[in-house]
Image (tube, rainbow, N blue to C red):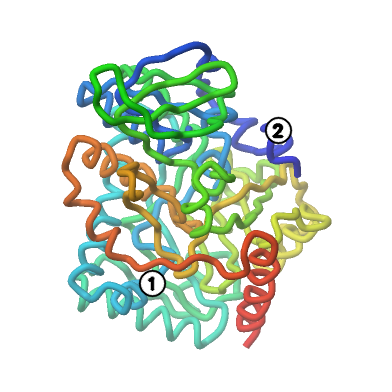
């Protein structure tokens, strides 16, 4: 897949989107207090929250708004992080892990609140189901729900054994599962575009097809220290820069690039199944994912298609026979869908960190950044945008718990880090079969 061309994604979301952002290419000398780089959810939310505070902000996107992971993902709005709470406890201690958990709950609520406030037509539905393929997975889920109940006072989740799970899912593959009514799912592209439009309406200046060539320290007109952001056809001098590029950072900021790796993830969408068939697959219309390291995740769309995601590529190369391989995974879960037409197959890149915890904070020069949500960012990215906006205004308190998370660069250097990751992930993939 040539990910530089939006249309090659062949996304169901692109075909069914109801919103469009109109933004020019950046040309000439533009004035702004803050430049936010990246037109996904992190960037759009940061720009929106700054514009609401009266800040002059330019939101710049190298391709099209919603082009990246924010507009291609599985659309799951779920609490927590890709790193388990038990992992975070080891990394930062329980008190900070608890603060991080509370932020994740606030992220889900932030998403709901923004959808309502800006009347974003993104088909939000409540409900999430986490399922285990093997008995040991089910046992781990039972331990997980008990841990969150006792340690984090999160008591809304329900446990389902194999028989109880069969009443929700039209599949006998799983040994048990946990339902969470506090989470949900939506149309990610419409939500992302809705946030970009809200930022534009609040007063932010939006520019697309405007890749940033460089960011360098500069002296502003009043003698204050700032930054010069250069583009092919123009430039912006500003007081602050926020990096919200995630997997598409490229080499713009090498120190940040060392902390993340782009990983391809892929989805297919079936033809419309009809409401009765769709409810026979997922009776409560929840989003679902399993607990494998290379997991399957799926849900039904508003027009009753099965959207089924799985497969990953750590080499950045699209898997061969993508549609066929994902269809095979889907039929393992729902054999009754045999013969169902696949209408769309697409993919994109997410950025992972070594510990799967998000990488958020400040560079030595003071610029802000957020990246490495590790496939768990649909709710968190928008919320973190509000925290970044607060930090621009001088309130860094809410970012401190994220800055306490220790991160390591990926080993191997520019040429060997991808092969090293492929080998490591192959080992973890084998563990799924144990």
Quarter occupied by residue 220:
top left
Residue at the spot x=49%, y=20% of the render?
Answer: 207
Quadrant position of residue 153: bottom left
State the SS at label 2.
loop
Question: Where is residue 9 drawn, in percent x and y?
Answer: 69, 39
Report the front residue among 429 and 409.
409
Q: Residue furthest top?
A: 28
Q: Give the side of residue 2 with respect to residue 405, left or right.
A: right
Above or below for 247 versus 123: below
- Residue of label 1: 84
Q: Is residue 271 above or below residue 207?
A: below
Q: Position of residue 393 (x, y in %)?
A: 19, 35
Residue at 41% across / 66% down in the picture?
Answer: 407
Q: Residue furthest right?
A: 321
Quarter of the picture containing the N terminus is: top right
Can the viewer see residue 285? no
- The residue positioned 38% from the left and 22% from the top of the image is 237
- Label 1 – label 2 distance at C-alpha: 35 Å
Q: Nearer the viewer, mark 1 or mark 2?
A: 2
For label 2, the residue is 5
């Amino acid at each position: 897949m040539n990910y530089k061309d939006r249309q090659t994604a062949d996304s169901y979301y692109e075909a069914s989107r109801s919103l469009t952002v109109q933004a020019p290419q950046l040309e000439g000398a533009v004035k702004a207090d803050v430049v936010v780089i990246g037109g996904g959810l992190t960037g759009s939310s940061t720009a929106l929250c700054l514009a609401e505070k009266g800040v002059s902000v330019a939101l710049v996107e190298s391709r099209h708004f919603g082009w990246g992971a924010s507009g291609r993902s599985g659309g799951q709005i779920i609490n927590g992080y890709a790193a388990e709470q038990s992992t975070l406890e080891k990394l930062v201690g329980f008190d900070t892990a608890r603060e991080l958990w509370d932020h994740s709950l606030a992220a889900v609520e932030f998403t709901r609140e923004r959808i309502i406030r800006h009347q974003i037509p993104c088909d939000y539905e409540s409900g999430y189901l986490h399922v285990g393929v093997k008995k040991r997975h089910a046992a781990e889920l039972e331990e997980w729900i008990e841990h969150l109940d006792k340690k984090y006072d999160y008591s809304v989740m329900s446990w389902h054994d194999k028989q109880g799970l069969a009443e929700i899912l039209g599949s006998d593959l799983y040994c048990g599962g946990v339902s969470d009514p506090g989470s949900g799912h939506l149309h990610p592209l419409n939500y992302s575009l809705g946030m970009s439009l809200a930022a534009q309406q609040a007063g932010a200046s939006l520019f697309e097809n405007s890749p940033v060539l460089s960011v360098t320290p500069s002296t502003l007109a009043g003698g204050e220290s700032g930054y010069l952001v250069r583009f092919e056809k123009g430039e912006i001098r500003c007081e602050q820069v926020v990096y919200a590029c995630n997997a598409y950072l490229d080499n713009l900021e090498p120190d940040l690039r060392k902390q993340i790796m782009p990983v391809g993830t892929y989805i297919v969408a079936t033809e419309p199944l009809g409401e009765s068939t769709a409810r026979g697959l997922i009776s409560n219309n929840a989003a679902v994912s399993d607990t494998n390291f290379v997991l399957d995740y799926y849900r039904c769309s508003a027009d009753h298609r099965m959207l089924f995601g799985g497969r990953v590529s750590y080499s950045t190369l699209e898997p061969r026979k993508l549609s066929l391989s994902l269809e095979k995974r889907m039929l393992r879960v729902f054999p009754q869908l045999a013969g169902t037409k696949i209408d769309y197959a697409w993919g994109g890149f997410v950025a992972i960190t070594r510990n799967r915890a998000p990488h958020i904070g400040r560079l030595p020069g003071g610029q802000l950044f957020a990246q490495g949500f590790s496939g768990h960012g649909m709710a968190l990215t928008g919320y973190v945008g509000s925290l970044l906006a607060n930090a621009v205004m001088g309130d860094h308190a809410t970012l401190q718990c994220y800055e306490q998370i220790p991160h390591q660069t990926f080993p191997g250097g520019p040429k060997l880090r991808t092969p090293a990751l492929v080998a490591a992930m192959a080992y973890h993939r084998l563990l799924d079969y144990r």
